[in-house]
Image (tube, coloured by chain):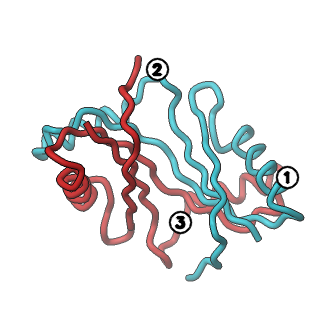
Chain colours: A red, B cyan
Amino acid sequence: MYRFKIFVTLKKGVLDPQGQAVKKSLQALGYQEVQEVKVGKYMEVDLEAESVDVARERVKHMCDKLLANPVIEEYRIEQAEFEPVEG
Amino acid sequence: MYRFKIFVTLKKGVLDPQGQAVKKSLQALGYQEVQEVKVGKYMEVDLEAESVDVARERVKHMCDKLLANPVIEEYRIEQAEFEPVEG
């Protein structure tokens, strides 16, 4: 079993209204030193595969097809230590 | 200027309906090898501070007060290379 971490962020130049909202909220709470906030998605996917290379390819496909919007988002994939999920 | 990356994930044992929905969608798209999906938030915060230690403390406070819900979520903070935001 393999685990991959996926980070999805908006491409440079794409408006980030969620990040702007978080920035304003932080400043309103007294964190005036905050200059910029960007908000993205973080996902962990556990999957079976013959090898880590096959697993990585499959995860890339998943990102292209479902997990990220290639028009406005970019993603980064990182292999992680697999630990069984509890609960 | 300092930049921190923040990863917010659900605590172990907390139900993750968004992750379940993504898992079902992936399986419906033909990725039957997917066993588990967890969905979290990823944020980047740029801030001014006297030192990196002060900056890290402030970011921790922001997480406790606004960015994460300590009842059901946990977070991890990582310093990143600061690059000016374009666009």
Q: Which mark sits nearer the N-terminus, 1 or 3?
A: 3
What's the amino acid at mark 3? Asp
* Pointer 1 and pointer 2 on the same chain: no
> In the rendered structure, are the residues bearing label 1 and label 3 in contact, judged by CB atoms less than 8 Å apart?
no
Chain holding disc 2: B
Which quarter of the rendered picture does the N terminus of chain B lie within?
Answer: bottom right
Judging depth in this view, the residue of B38 and B81 nearest the camera is B81
The image quarter in which residue B53 lies: bottom right
Mark 1–mark 3 Cα distance, whole angstroms, equals 22 Å
Give the residue number, with chain letter if any, for mark 1: A30
Measured along the vertical axis of the image, is residue A83 above or below residue B49? above
What's the amino acid at mark 2? Gly
Give the residue number, with chain letter if any, for mark 2: B13
Measured along the vertical axis of the image, is residue B6 above or below residue B20? below
Q: Position of residue A68 (x, y in %)?
A: 33, 59
Chain holding disc 1: A
